[in-house]
Image (cartoon, coloured by chain):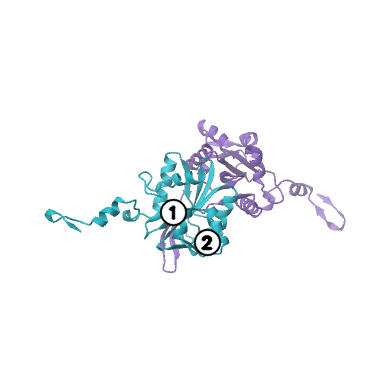
Chain colours: A purple, B cyan
Amino acid sequence: MINYPFGIQIDETKKEKTNKNSYKNRGLTLESLLNEANSYYISVDKALIYKKPTPIQVVKINKDNIINEAYFKSPSTTDYNGIYKGKYIDYEAKETKSKTSFSLNNIKKHQITHLLNVEKHCGIAFIIVYFTVLDEIYIYPSFNLNKIIESNKKSISIEEFRTNGHLIKLSVTPKLDYLKIIDRIYF
Amino acid sequence: MINYPFGIQIDETKKEKTNKNSYKNRGLTLESLLNEANSYYISVDKALIYKKPTPIQVVKINKDNIINEAYFKSPSTTDYNGIYKGKYIDYEAKETKSKTSFSLNNIKKHQITHLLNVEKHCGIAFIIVYFTVLDEIYIYPSFNLNKIIESNKKSISIEEFRTNGHLIKLSVTPKLDYLKIIDRIYF
């Protein structure tokens, strides 16, 4: 801590942190970052990528068309899909508090199968994982996912993300400019 | 009506109808036909096309995770999307009782904009309309839709569907083998 005249105190560690590529210090969730990025891409006509609605099983609707009994259902596919540079793009987004690995319990087996199927059909498929404590967001392509599944692993280590995944650095507009990484991997 | 011996009566008009390519006589909805077709395409690894969940705004959830107040929201995009032969495919499905035209009131303006955007991004985009009384189902590509919108028309006539749309004839497996038509139009 440095004491400046007039009683101003600047915490140098904090100063450094806010200068860093930090999502955490801004209190941002992965969903809000992706929504901002996708809205931006649509607005500049770069890509058309939307989040799918949460699947809900409606049981009762009253006469005013208000749903008064419904249940959350398990999604049959993934969170986001759309089109980028003429290619079909499909991904699942997840956050984890772990500092060491991403547990595959966080993602349903049929969702992984779906991503691998998309790849087989020549689409772009990946998971995007936000390690909230580490403050790091990675794109992890489906072609690496396949390897993990075949080796019967229960989680993907942070080292694996750092080696075969792709870190997304904080940008200005949009903050999470993940298509820049997609360009590097697929185009 | 022909009177056969033993009191058997066969309605010749009905007989002819059931022999025809008829969806109506089987009591099928367009949604059930599309679901059957898409499930079939996934099972034989021909395409990955899914219906998006209905968007619902959840207001109250009780302690057992049961939703007890929620509202239907207007969809931001279309009903179905996915990948076919490496291409992004996106469409909206509608039924109409009209025998003469399909009113554009049945489809939201932003949904039409979305379909035209998909086309601009080199995806396959169309509407699929079931004229239930006529018992005819048509694929109407987005490149024709553009023409209709530009001329400020409020509906698409059945003649227009018959001229620039593509009738889907009843098949065996799947009943609504609409990708056969997509092959003819786009590949």
Q: Quadrant of residue B95?
A: bottom left
Residue at image coords 66%, 39%: A184
Q: Name the one closer to the observer, B2 or B182.
A: B2
Which amino acid type is marked by label 1? Answer: Tyr
Q: Chain letter of disc 2?
A: B
Callout 2 crowding tier (Cα within 10 Å): few <14, some 14–19, many ≥20 = some
Q: Does A121 sit left or right of A132 as displayed?
A: left
Element assignment for label 2 = loop
Element assignment for label 1 = strand
Q: Are marks 2 and 1 in contact (CB under 8 Å)?
A: no
Q: According to the image, label 1 marks what residue?
A: B138
Looking at the rendered image, the disc whose residue lies closer to the viewer, 2 or 1, is: 1
Q: According to the image, label 2 marks what residue?
A: B108
Q: Name the one closer to the observer, B88 or A152.
A: B88
Q: Percent x, y for residue A61?
A: 42, 64
Q: Name the one closer to the observer, A71 or B145.
A: B145
Q: Does B150 sit left or right of A57 as displayed?
A: right
Q: Percent x, y for residue B181?
A: 45, 46
Query: How far is disc 2 from disc 1 in space, using C-alphas?
Result: 19 Å
Residue A153 - label: none
Residue at image coords 56%, 57%: B146
Callout 1 crowding tier (Cα within 10 Å): few <14, some 14–19, many ≥20 = many
Q: Name the one closer to the observer, B47 or B144.
A: B144
Answer with mark 2 or mark 1, whichever residue precedes in sequence.
Answer: 2
Identity of the residue furthest to the left in this view:
B6
Q: Chain letter of disc 1?
A: B
Q: Are marks 2 and 1 on the same chain?
A: yes
Q: Percent x, y for residue B85?
A: 51, 40
Q: Does A90 sit left or right of A65 as displayed?
A: right
Task: Evaluate whether residue A40 shows in this view.
Answer: yes
Name the image quarter holding the C terminus of chain A.
top right
